[in-house]
């Protein structure tokens, strides 16, 4: 997080014209007072320098100096509160008022870059006081404001902040949305303050949002290497090159890049990965033992643990890969629990602060009314006394009515919280059941593998290992469904249209699902033509839908075939994909119900009941359609269409 603050602050400084001894290009007198104010922020001496800055800014008509005065005011307030362990409602109101003043003055005088700098100050204030949800909301509101105003710098600035906040939560799906937005802004912007920045870090972050060892991950790493312009960019790119080399068993390149990282003084402070990451990879290459729990507790991020798990699979150490994944799941469960409890506590505190704020405002209004009444009493004693009595009676009636309305609202809010808690409990119970099945399988086969070597043959042990890996992937699929549904509900699920090749997407989807085939079942691909066919769509979303169709077919097909077909003639203007199987099929009267969330025809089949619902939402966002072909009687046939010439996605 601190790395992003440093980078963004440097971006801000780079926006101002560089004059000799006056980098802000202010009036000399204003700059002198500004420098003194900056040096004394948070101290008793600041007040005199701050007042002098505002006075000189107004005297010389220096609009930038006037804006900077309000920025220093905001810095002074937050700095003076930095040592306060728990800020009061009044403290937060002072910060909010100062932030709003920076926004108004920045808009009025045309220096919006200082508004975003002010947001950096405010979000740091809340973040450092443990109010992370408030900090997140402030940046998201600023991003929405910048988007509404078509402010390229604001979009760029806030997107990079949101990337850092969501990566810290290890929410890679949401962070991918903002990474792509930042990259789009960079590619299309002519703003020199944006163009002079290097997108290398963004490409590294984007690679982390894709499956390990996927083509998309490798493409992002290549782009990160090509766009690296600073030493830190190169250090980060070297780490990702080393990971890719280890995954591809390129020992010479891995050793070279690993040594460069370990010999780089910037590597430990960059928090890209713990140096022990390379020690663990070396042990895998040499066939030595690794303590999974120690690795998970040591490495900086869950993503690095995923790297290590995949490298373990590459070096035929499936058991270690499983242990790493299991330890990672436990760590993620602990982190999710901590985040959930922290958010709940913060929400309760925010609710209390909001109520207290309303009471304070009401008290101020009552005080104003009382003051007015006293003034009338002084002017007209006799008449004032009568008016005062009547007003107090009316005020009491209004206060009683407001109290009754407040009680009703609180009861309604309490009922809403109760219903939400019940819904959460039901969801947790359902998910506990779904997660327990693969976990039980994983634990069971792990216990079988721990038996003496002469109990089972090598072939049987290999089969047990494969069952463990399959159930681990099944567990990941359950979590991905939940994250995808959450991303759609929050409105942050983005469709990215690009040139895509049909046959490649289909074959990639089949390779992702074929490990789920039941014994004796054959998966077949029948394209309309064997020639490559290019059209514009979102390849990742298309593959996500096809993998879901194929996985469902594998679950419900015990014998026969599963066939994937493509066609541009079945529905003119659309690419039509169809997955048909010889399995149990779906009753015609359930053809629409199965696309509802949490709907499962067979409760004994693994899954969240979210997959088909997510597929339909994705297809509709892409301008296409998903349905069950009820005319097919040999099993089940799911059809997906997507436009060959899609409209631009907003």
Image: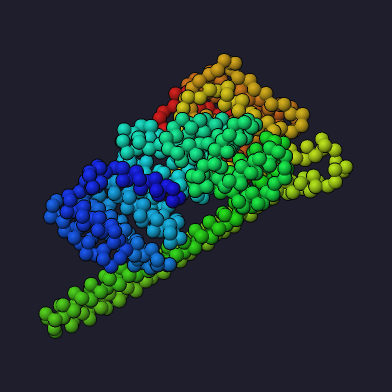
- Which residue occupies 27% across, 46% down? 112
- Which residue occupies 53% across, 56% down? 339
Q: Is residue 415 above or below residue 164?
A: below
- Which residue occupies 17% across, 51% down? 28
Pick the residue in front: 315 or 462: 315
Q: Is residue 146 above or below residue 228?
A: below
Where does the C terminus fall, quadrant-wise? Answer: top left
Q: Position of residue 114 (x, y in %)?
A: 29, 49
Pick the residue in front: 318 or 238: 238
Does residue 83 appear to the left or right of 641 in the view shown? left
Does residue 145 appear to the left or right of 130 in the view shown? left
Q: How many marks?
A: 0
Q: Position of residue 550 (x, y in %)?
A: 64, 32
Q: Position of residue 170 (x, y in %)?
A: 53, 47
Q: Position of residue 128 (x, y in %)?
A: 43, 59
- Which residue occupies 30% across, 76% down? 396
Q: Is residue 429 above or below residue 489?
A: below
Pick the residue in front: 184 or 12: 12
């Amino acid at each position: 997080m601190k790395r992003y603050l440093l980078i963004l602050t440097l971006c801000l400084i780079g926006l101002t014209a560089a004059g000799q001894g006056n980098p802000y290009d202010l009036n000399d007198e204003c700059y002198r007072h500004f420098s003194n104010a900056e040096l004394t922020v948070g101290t008793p001496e600041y007040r005199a320098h701050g007042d002098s800055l505002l006075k000189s800014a107004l005297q010389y008509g220096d609009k930038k100096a006037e804006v900077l005065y309000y920025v220093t005011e905001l810095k002074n307030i937050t700095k003076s509160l930095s040592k306060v362990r728990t800020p009061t409602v009044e403290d937060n109101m002072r910060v909010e008022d100062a932030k709003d003043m920076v926004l108004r003055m920045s808009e009025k005088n045309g220096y919006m870059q200082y508004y975003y700098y002010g947001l950096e100050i405010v979000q740091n204030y809340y973040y450092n006081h443990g109010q992370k949800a408030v900090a997140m909301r402030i940046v998201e509101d600023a991003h929405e404001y910048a988007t509404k105003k078509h402010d390229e710098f604001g979009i760029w600035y806030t997107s990079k902040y949101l990337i850092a906040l969501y990566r810290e939560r290890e929410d890679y799906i949401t962070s991918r949305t903002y990474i792509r937005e930042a990259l789009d802004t960079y590619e299309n912007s002519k703003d020199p303050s944006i163009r002079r920045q290097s997108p290398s870090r963004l490409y590294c972050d984007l690679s982390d949002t894709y499956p390990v060892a996927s083509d998309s991950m490798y493409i992002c790493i290549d782009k990160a290497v090509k766009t690296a312009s600073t030493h830190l960019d190169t250090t980060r790119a070297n780490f990702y090159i080393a990971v890719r080399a280890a995954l591809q068993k390129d020992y010479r390149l891995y050793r070279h890049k690993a040594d460069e990282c370990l010999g780089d003084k910037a590597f430990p402070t960059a928090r890209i990965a713990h140096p022990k990451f390379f020690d663990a990879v070396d042990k895998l290459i040499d066939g030595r033992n690794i303590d999974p729990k120690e690795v998970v507790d040591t490495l900086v991020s869950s993503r690095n643990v995923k790297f290590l798990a995949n490298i373990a699979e590459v070096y035929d150490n499936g058991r270690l890969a499983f242990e790493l994944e299991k330890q990672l799941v436990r760590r993620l469960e602990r982190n999710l629990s901590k985040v959930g409890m922290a958010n709940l506590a913060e929400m309760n505190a925010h609710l209390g602060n909001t109520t207290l704020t309303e009471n304070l405002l009401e008290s101020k209004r009552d005080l104003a009314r009382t003051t007015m009444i006293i003034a009338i009493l002084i002017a007209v004693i006799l008449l004032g006394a009568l008016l005062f009595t009547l007003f107090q009676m009316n005020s009491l009636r209004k206060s009683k009515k407001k109290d009754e309305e407040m009680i009703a609202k609180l009861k309604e809010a309490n009922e809403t919280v109760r219903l939400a808690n019940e819904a959460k409990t039901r969801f947790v119970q359902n998910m506990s059941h779904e997660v327990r099945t693969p976990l039980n399988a994983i634990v069971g086969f792990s216990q079988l593998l721990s038996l003496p070597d002469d109990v089972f043959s090598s072939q049987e042990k290999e089969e047990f290992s494969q069952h463990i890996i399959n159930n681990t992937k099944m567990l990941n699929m359950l979590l991905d469904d939940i994250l995808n549904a959450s991303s759609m509900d929050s409105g942050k699920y983005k469709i990215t249209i690009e040139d895509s090749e049909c046959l490649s997407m289909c074959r990639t989807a089949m390779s992702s699902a074929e490990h789920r085939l039941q014994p004796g079942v054959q998966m077949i691909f029948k394209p309309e033509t064997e020639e490559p066919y290019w059209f514009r769509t979102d390849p990742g979303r298309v593959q996500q839908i096809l993998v879901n169709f194929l996985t469902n077919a594998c679950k419900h097909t015990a014998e026969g075939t599963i066939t994937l077909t493509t066609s541009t003639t079945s529905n003119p203007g659309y690419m039509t994909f169809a997955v048909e199987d010889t399995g149990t099929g779906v009753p015609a009267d359930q053809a629409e119900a199965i696309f509802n969330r949490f709907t499962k025809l067979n409760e004994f089949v693994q899954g969240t009941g979210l997959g088909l619902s997510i597929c339909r939402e994705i297809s509709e966002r892409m301008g296409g359609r998903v349905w069950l072909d009820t005319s097919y009687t040999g099993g089940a046939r799911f059809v997906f269409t997507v436009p060959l010439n899609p409209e631009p996605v907003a």
